[in-house]
Amino acid sequence: MTFFAQILNFLILVAILRALCYKPVVRMIQAREDKIAESLEKADADVAAAEELKAKYQAQLAEAREQAQAITDKAEKVASQLREDKLQETKREVEQMKESARAEIQRDQERAQDQIRAQVVALSIQAAGKIVSDKMTADADAEEVGKFIDTLDKDKIGDLSC
């Protein structure tokens, strides 16, 4: 009988322990499993969000690099255009300076020719005056000087034409 009493005591003890300890321990273990599963799901969601954020930042970085390259290309193009414009402007200024110098040289040549003509006329008049000092009149002097100047126009004095 003691054996049956021990078995009965054991079964009562198991029932009491099951009611008082087993169910709360099972609930606590289940709650812990649920919490761990929730933490794993949250961690997976956080990893996915981090990957998405990383991809977004990489896309923004790539776009920023493209924009920086576009800005650099545009700046190089503008600098090249400015350089070309300055070069063209400098060429125009050089051409204007050349034209101005040519015009100045032409004016100087014309002045020199006029001075030479004036000197030739003066020398011609003096030479003619000495040669025919009494025999010629003013009209004859003018006619002789005109003939002399005509012959000078046909011939050149130095490298300048008269």
Image (cartoon, helix red, strand yellow):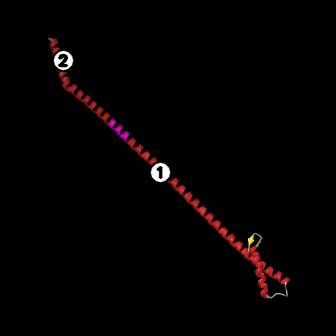
* Residue drawn at the location 80% of the way across and 82% of the way down: 125
> Of callouts 1 and 2, which one flags the residue occurring earlier in the amino acid sequence?
2
Residue 49 lies within the magenta run: yes
Residue 9 lies within the magenta run: no
The quadrant in which residue 10 appears is top left
Q: CA distance from mark 1 to mark 2?
A: 85 Å
* Residue drawn at the location 77% of the way across and 80% of the way down: 147
Q: Position of residue 118 (x, y in %)?
A: 76, 79
Q: Taken as a whole, is the magenta stretch helix, strand or loop?
A: helix
Q: Position of residue 105 (x, y in %)?
A: 69, 70
Q: Position of residue 31 (x, y in %)?
A: 26, 31
* Observer-nearest of 134 and 12: 134
SS label for mark 1: helix
- Magenta range is 43-52
Q: Is residue 33 above or below residue 64?
A: above
Answer left or right for 88 relative to 103.
Answer: left
The disc label shown at residue 144, or none: none
The quadrant in which residue 138 appears is bottom right
| Quadrant housing the C terminus | bottom right
Q: Position of residue 18 (x, y in %)?
A: 20, 24
| Quadrant housing the N terminus | top left
Answer left or right for 48 relative to 145.
Answer: left
SS label for mark 2: helix
* Observer-nearest of 148 and 75: 148
Answer left or right for 21 relative to 107.
Answer: left
Nearer to us: label 1 or label 2: 1
The disc label shown at residue 70, or none: 1
Which residue was labeled with disc 2? 10
Q: Residues within 10 Å of mark 2 (few under 14, many from 20)?
A: few
Answer left or right for 6 relative to 66.
Answer: left
